[in-house]
Amino acid sequence: MRRVLIRRPGGHRVLGLVSEPDLVPAAGQAAVRVRAAGVNFADCIARMGHYEAAKSLYPITPGFEFAGTVESCGSGVTEPKPGQEVFGITRFGGYASQRLRRDFRLRRA
């Protein structure tokens, strides 16, 4: 799994790419292979250090919305199913190649 990581506020040069092990969904979660992430004003403001909710979270991965394909699901998840295309929202973390979300926070695309 890869994700964008901002270790400290600043310009576009503070955006770094890190590799980590793939995520494994727990009960009630779905693992989504992210194919697209929204880029918006709030992400830029968070990167620059002006987003109040992000100031205490560095290092941080920006991104509030994402879309992709369900890879696997934890126990108890009946929808969505692996292989289905979904979109979701998150409080940061969308700039990643994989996301874990509670099943009820995802919608079919």
Image (cartoon, rainbow, N blue to C red):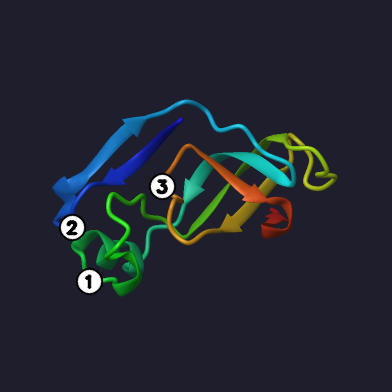
Say which amino acid is labelled 1.
His
Circle on res. 95: 3
Whether pointer 2 and pointer 3 mark residues with C-beta atoms closer than 8 Å, the reply is no
* Classed neighbour count for the residue bearing mark 2: other residues with Cα under 10 Å, few (<14), some (14–19), many (≥20): many
Disc on res. 50: 1
**Residue 98 at x, y = what percent?**
52, 38
| First in sequence: mark 2 vs mark 3 | 2
Q: Of label 3 and label 1, which has the lower sequence position?
A: 1
Helix, strand or loop under label 3: loop
Measured Cα–Cα span from mark 3 to mark 1 = 19 Å
The percent coordinates of residue 79 (x first, y second) are 81, 48
Name the residue: 30% across, 74% down.
52
Residue 73's place in the image compared with 103, above or below, is: above
Disc 3: CA contacts within 10 A as few (<14), some (14-19) or many (>=20): many
Residue at the spot 36% in from the left edge and 54% down from the top edge = 62
* Numbered circle sitting on residue 9: 2
Disc 3 marks which amino acid? Tyr
At a point 63% along the width and 39% down the height, the residue shown is: 31
**Res 76 quadrant in image:** top right
How far, Cα to Cα, is label 2 from label 3?
16 Å
The answer to whether marks 3 and 1 mark residues whose Cβ atoms lie closer than 8 Å is: no
Q: For this view, does 20 lie left or right of residue 106?
A: left
Q: Is residue 28 left or right of residue 54?
A: right
User: On the image, which quarter does residue 3 sit in?
Assistant: top left
Tell me the amino acid under the disc marked 2.
Pro
- Say whether disc 2 or disc 1 marks the residue closer to the N-terminus: 2
The residue lying at 73 percent from left, 58 percent from top is 104
